Image (tube, rainbow, N blue to C red):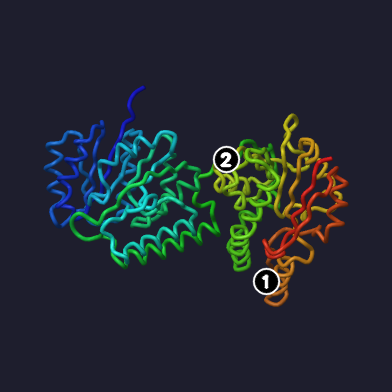
């Protein structure tokens, strides 16, 4: 098997005291690699030194830009250069020796089987020698924010990385907008949202060898604001951070349905308010509650059907535990689902009343806010169809809005305010025909479809909005 083609990329700005040593140490590694430096017209003469070094090191090249255009944009240039040059692996690091070139072989050794490897300062004690208390606190706080808001357990703000470009779609990087230091956590977030497998190795991150840090207080504040903005955008429109995939199958000649309009509606004041509130609710309440319920009722690897999957915001993270097939009649919803859940087992367009699974059976079926949009006759037909494709003893888990739930009252008040008081014509969601009223109604409806009610619960975990109805196939 041929050895992978490897590129090492290092951006520079005012690194005249480091570049010669860095070039020599990289070229001395027992690796067959090409080396590219990118200099942003450093006023200290870094570019001239790089040109001199490139004349003596055959594997080295230099890119010169006209001025300081941002560390993030520099890395985008390096990534584009690697793809265009047909490289299999790209390694990036800083030029100030906070990243030790001798760690590169260890990073490359950890890469097989993963999409990328990140050098982490948070995996071992004593990894920040020479850092004062203030710097330690700031970096730990930054790590807390990226892990809490973006869900990234890795060291998200470092440049020491190895990418296996054979496993990463280049289009993913086009979703990264930052040209500054925010590039590092945004790119890691986008890679993670597109299902990339990200590993870590522990590294020591000493204080800079020469010069002072290029990350100014102003840059740090801007990075923090960018992080908050990224979190809000991901909350409201998570699909914008994934390239997604097309549904595995589509129905022929399906007319546009009401739900297509729902998932592609404009940003009027009422719709925007509802979209933001719904996104926050799905992320903060539905997703953890759904995860809790599914993991209690099904074992890892269980084959589940999300019937009426919508945009799939609440499914993010579930595909690591279960094999989920997502179906919906709306192509608009399925496209959003594919962006939010790029590693889904299967994404299919389907009519819930005639599911396209003749010789397949599922361990479970679940949906969120679907059943209330049908009348009781239609609900009985849906449940019979679910019964058909479930294995014996399989379960359905239905998150069903309660007739007296908080969302019904709040949305009712909003509709009244916007339409009756302000004279608008706002309809935030399709009609909710059959809201659940209690255990007795749930039991009766399930019995009609061949299910026995095994659990009925409504409570604080989702702010008393939806009843969780669990039925077992009889």
> Is the C terminus in the top left, top right, bottom left or bottom right quadrant?
top right
Marks 2 and 1 close (CB-CB < 8 Å): no
Measured as percent of width and height from the top left, residue 457 is found at 76, 58
- Front residue of 388 and 438: 438
Measured as percent of width and height from the top left, residue 81 is found at 31, 40
**Residue located at (80% from left, 53% from top):** 374
Q: Which of marks 2 and 1 is in front?
A: 2
Measured as percent of width and height from the top left, residue 79 is found at 34, 43
Q: Residues within 10 Å of mark 2 (few under 14, many from 20)?
A: some
Quadrant of the image occupied by residue 372:
bottom right
Quadrant of the image occupied by residue 383:
top right
Q: Is residue 265 left or right of residue 238?
A: right
Q: Which of marks 2 and 1 is nearer the N terminus?
A: 2
Residue to which mark 1 is pinned:
424
Measured as percent of width and height from the top left, residue 232 is found at 51, 62
Furthest residue in direction top, as rendered: 1
Residue to which mark 2 is pinned:
246
**Residue located at (14% from left, 52% from top):** 17
- Kindly state the secondary structure of the residue where label 1 is placed: loop
- Kindly state the secondary structure of the residue where label 2 is placed: loop
Q: Residues within 10 Å of mark 1 (few under 14, many from 20)?
A: few
Asked if 39 appears above or below 423 in the picture, the reply is: above
Calculate the distance from the C-alpha at mark 2 to the C-alpha at mark 1: 36 Å
Furthest residue in direction front, as rendered: 125
Asked if 25 appears above or below 145 in the picture, the reply is: above
């Amino acid at each position: 098997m041929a050895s992978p083609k490897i590129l090492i990329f290092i951006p520079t700005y005012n690194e005249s005291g480091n570049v010669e040593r860095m070039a020599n140490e990289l070229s001395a590694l027992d690796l067959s690699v090409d080396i590219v430096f990118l200099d942003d017209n450093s006023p200290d003469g870094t570019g001239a030194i790089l040109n001199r070094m490139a004349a003596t090191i055959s594997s080295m090249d230099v890119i010169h830009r006209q001025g300081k255009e941002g560390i993030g944009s520099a890395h985008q240039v390096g990534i584009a250069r690697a793809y265009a040059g047909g490289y299999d692996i790209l390694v990036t690091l800083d030029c100030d020796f906070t990243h030790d070139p001798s760690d590169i072989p260890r990073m490359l050794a950890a890469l097989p089987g993963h999409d990328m490897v990140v050098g982490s300062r948070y995996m071992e004690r004593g990894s920040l020698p020479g850092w004062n208390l203030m710097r330690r606190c700031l970096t730990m706080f930054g790590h807390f924010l990226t892990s809490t808001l973006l869900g990234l357990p890795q060291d998200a703000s470092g440049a020491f990385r190895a990418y296996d470009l054979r496993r990463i779609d280049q289009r993913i990087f086009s979703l990264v907008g930052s040209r500054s230091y925010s590039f590092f956590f945004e790119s890691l977030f986008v890679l993670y949202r597109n299902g990339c497998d990200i590993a870590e190795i522990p590294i020591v991150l000493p204080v800079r060898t020469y010069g002072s840090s290029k990350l100014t207080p102003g840059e740090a504040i801007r990075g923090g604001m960018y992080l908050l903005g990224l979190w809000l955008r991901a909350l409201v429109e998570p699909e914008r951070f994934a390239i997604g995939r097309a549904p595995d199958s589509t129905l022929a000649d399906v007319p546009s349905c009401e739900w297509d309009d729902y998932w592609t509606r404009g940003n009027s004041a009422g719709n925007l308010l509802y979209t933001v509130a719904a996104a926050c609710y799905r992320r903060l309440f539905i997703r953890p509650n759904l995860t809790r319920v599914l993991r209690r009722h099904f074992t890892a690897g269980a084959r589940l059907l999300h019937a009426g999957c919508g945009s799939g915001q609440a499914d993010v993270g579930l595909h690591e535990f279960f094999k989920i097939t997502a179906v919906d009649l709306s192509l608009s919803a399925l496209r959003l689902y594919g962006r939010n859940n790029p590693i889904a087992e299967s994404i299919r367009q389907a009519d819930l009343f005639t599911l396209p699974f003749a010789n397949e059976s599922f361990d479970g079926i679940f949906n969120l806010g679907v059943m209330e949009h049908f009348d009781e006759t239609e609900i009985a037909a849906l449940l019979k169809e679910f019964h058909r494709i479930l294995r014996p003893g399989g379960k359905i888990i239905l998150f069903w809005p309660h007739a007296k739930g908080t969302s019904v009252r709040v949305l009712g008040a909003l509709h009244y305010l916007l339409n009756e008081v302000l004279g608008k014509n706002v309809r935030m969601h399709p009609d909710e025909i059959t809201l659940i009223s209690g255990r007795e109604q749930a039991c009766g409806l399930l019995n009609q479809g061949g299910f026995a009610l095994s659990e009925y619960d409504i409570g604080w975990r989702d702010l008393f909005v939806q009843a969780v109805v669990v039925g077992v196939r009889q």
